[in-house]
Image (cartoon, coloured by chain):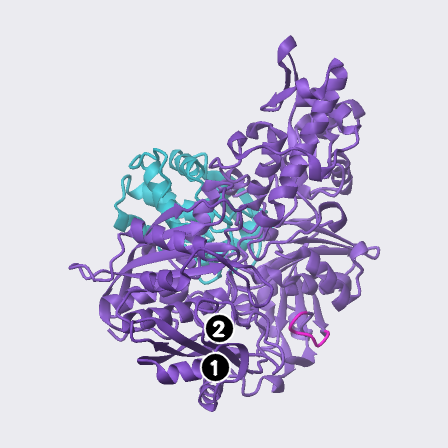
Chain colours: A purple, B cyan
Amino acid sequence: MLHEHRSVVLDRRTVLKASLLAGGGLALEALIPMPLWALEQGEQQATAPAQLSAFVSIAPDGTVTIVSKNPEIGQGVKTSLPMMVADELDCDWSQVRIAQADVDQARYGEQSAGGSTATPKNWLPMRQTGAAARAMLVQAAAQRWNIGANEITTAKGRIFHRPSGRSLGYGEVASAAAALSPPDLKSVPLKRPEEFTIIGRPLVGIDSARIVKGEPIFGVDTRLPGMLYAVYQVAPAHGGRLVKANIEAAKRSHGVRYVLPIMGNGDADAGLADGVAIVASNWWLAEQARSKLAVAWDLSAAKGHSSAAYREKASAAIAAGAGTDLRLDGDPSAKLASAAKRIAARYDYPFVAHAPMEPQNCTARYRDGRLEIWAPSQAPQRGLDQLHKALDIAPEAVTLHQRRAGGGFGRRLMSDYMIQVAAIAKAIPGVPVQLLWSREDDIRRDYYRPGGWHSFEAGIGANGELVAFTDHFVTFGDGKTTARAAGFNASMPPAGLIQHLRYSQSMMPTVVTTGWLRAPGSNALCFASQSFLDEVAHAAGTDLPKLMLALLGERREIPAQDGGLAFDTGRARDVIEKVVRTSGWSLKPAESGTAQGFAFYFSHRGYFAEVVEASVSGAQVAVHKVWVAGDIGSQIINPMGAENQVRGAVIDGLAQALSGQAIEFVDGVVQQSNFNDFPLARIPLTPEIEIAWVKSDKPPTGLGEPALPPVIPALTNAIFAATGTRIRSLPLRLSG
Amino acid sequence: MPYRLNINGDIRQVDVPAEMPLLWVLRDELGLVGTKYGCGKGFCGSCTVHVNGAAQRSCLLPVGSVGNARIHTIEHIGSTPIGARLQEAWLRIDVMQCGYCQAGQIMSACALLGQTARPSDEQINSAMTGNICRCGCYNRIRSAIRIAAGMEEESGRVA
């Protein structure tokens, strides 16, 4: 008998049986929500759950199983997407079980966790899926009662014919409904917002009860019969290549079963890096054997790739002039020259690691030409493509199970760990193997948020108005294209809000792998631009909320320069005015020594204005309170999870600024290694966080990212208000 | 080396090197994977277990030094009155985001309430500062500890 407290060790027959029950395509977790009778009698047609669509099946007892297609990384989609289905299905949340989908693009469409896109992309399709299943149930009941479907109502998983007083549970007509043709998704009627019974309710996450008991649901908890554990030793410097490996001593190390030198595909950025895999009966034994490896690496590609050299090159690029124009509106040079007042400042920020609490890991078994993978991934479908490219394993030959990820933050959009474990598994056919990176591996081989440098200039008119604005951005790239996540946003305010503006860019090459960190681009650009606009506000004799409101002007939509999302000045105004009210905004420091700072940003479809109240004592910054006003549309899907996302984003941003987070390089070798030298936020840093939603009439959008960017400049602007010291470089260091 | 360990009230036998940290005995030898690896250096607290009732980092505890000590892990904590109250409080306000660190958080909180039934904010900060939550669930961790200690009615407020 299967038991939900047991770890996931299943034989083939059980897995097969479970996937038959659930209609195929489901991960092992599909076993857990299944009622025990179903597992015991599953092959008997009469009692099997009826499959109404790829996402909805209903058992005779009325239990509804909803498939959650996207990766769960702590952002709450495994709860919130099924909430959309369940509400339109009009069942009771207590009837609902949720199964995590395997990766199957044909069946489920896009499956990814990135860019805060799950809500906006699925808001209609998931509701239509639920509504379609409901329509089929209603149709089946109408046929049974021989009445019109329009005489039928539903509530909490039951079907009613009020005039005759008859009713049926969903489970009683589910198999008849499953035999009907599904209605057209696009024309199936949807609820009005006031009819929602599940969407908008604060609901506890679907996995939470298992998490507090320590049940095995994360990637790294995967256990298979006969499974071994692996580490993968890569070159000490980014871009390093394997020359020669003496593996004899490591092979003789206690518990070690295999030592496998693996030549990569030379594409360290998106493929398989050269390395040596050590496979043992216990992960710690594999880890211990690393010290017995004698490997010669070619590190020549990384020579000169040092943080100090990057800083010098950036300074030289800024001194040399404006770089390549990304956007030129009007004549900013002339307007700067004729401005009543002119200010300039340089800003910079470092490389930052993601450091999710669950280090990179993946489990795989290669057998009879097929690969089975258990992955905590944010982009499993892209992972399949990269596997194909790196190891020539066709997507059709791969079964990819999604496991809950212990944090993502953008790190797991990359698939390097998945390709590494596949290469190892392919080398030892039939042997299941779990690759786990040490924390040191994780800190040293990230796809980092790249560092960047900005040289700003602003011209202020006689009436304190902003007349010209320029930013020369120095970043990383090959001269033509910026490195991953190293680009600029040419629509960033005040672009589109003033007549005379130039955004320009210079770039330098790097061997370091860069990538998307929560609110990519925005997490850095917002700090630099909203801090400098705070300088403009002070120079103009006003404050940043007033300056922003003046710049925003009338309510209108401004199209993005690059064809991206339009910017709604009205929504921006509303969140700014809201946070000014909730925070009791004042530029003047209080007698207690605390002061407030403000910032606004629009990213990932969300409008956020935030105020930080902080005080400074010597070199110590204390954050007392943060006020957040956000507009992510008309509906918060799950307020319980939504508030957690905002608080998490605020604390994440504060930690980037305050905790000393910076990744530095010497000849391509990362100088940090663990949480002692790459510190994360700890509980004493945590301020009170007050959240206010501005509900516009727009469709709901995502929340994993947009609350993060403003908190950093709101903090640094508060430090300026409290002390007169302007923070132009992150992580901030105060001399005290 | 063969060892007989007292884990969650059961005697478990393993044969591993004396230096192997308890964490890897739990996870890879005994299949008790609720206790998590986060840093391996005692910086993050994800691997927190109870050794004779005291919170300890199992990633730094060589199995050879455990002896007859009573080891309790997250899998067992719900059968203790404080552990059950903490799990209930954690769920009442849904503390977690990704959830990976929460076993360690609950183990540390449980040791705190075992020592100090009604901890002050400073005592909570001090007892919990060794446990990192990368998702930043700290406001709710504080609230849940206070709820479990009977110090805060949730009254619809989720801090």
| Residue type, mark 1 in image | Ser
Q: Determine if the magenta segment contains residue A394.
A: no
For label 1, count other residues whose C-alpha is less than 10 Å away and answer few (under 14), some (14-19) or many (20+). some
Q: Position of residue A515 (x, y in %)?
A: 57, 68
Q: Nearer the viewer, residue A58 or A133?
A: A133
Element type where label 1 sits in the image? helix
- Location of residue A669 in the rendering, given as x and y in whole percent from the top left corner: 53, 79
Amino acid beneath label 2: Phe
Where does residue A297 sit, x and y in percent of width and height?
64, 82
Query: Residue A208, relative to residue A142: is it above or below?
Result: below
Residue B42 image offset from top left, x and y in percent: 43, 60
Report the span colored magenta: A265-270
**Figure check: A233 above or below A376:** below
Q: Is residue A347 left or right of residue A341?
A: right
B132 relative to B21 in the view: left or right:
left
Magenta region, main secondary structure:
loop
| Residue B69 in sight in this render | no
Q: Residue furthest top?
A: A164
Q: Are marks 2 and 1 in contact (CB under 8 Å)?
A: yes
Residue under label 2, please give it. A351
Q: Is residue A154 above or below residue A448?
A: above
The quadrant in which the C terminus of chain A is found is: bottom left
Q: Quadrant of residue A486?
A: bottom right
* Residue nearest the observer in this picture, B30 or A321: A321
A419 or A596, nearer to the observer = A596
- Determine the chain carrying the residue at label 1: A
Q: How many marks?
A: 2
| Closest to the observer, B42 or B51 | B42
Instruction: Give the residue drawn at x 33%, y 75%.
Output: A461
Residue that numbered label 1 is attached to: A307
Q: CA distance from mark 2 to mark 1?
A: 9 Å
Chain label for disc 2: A
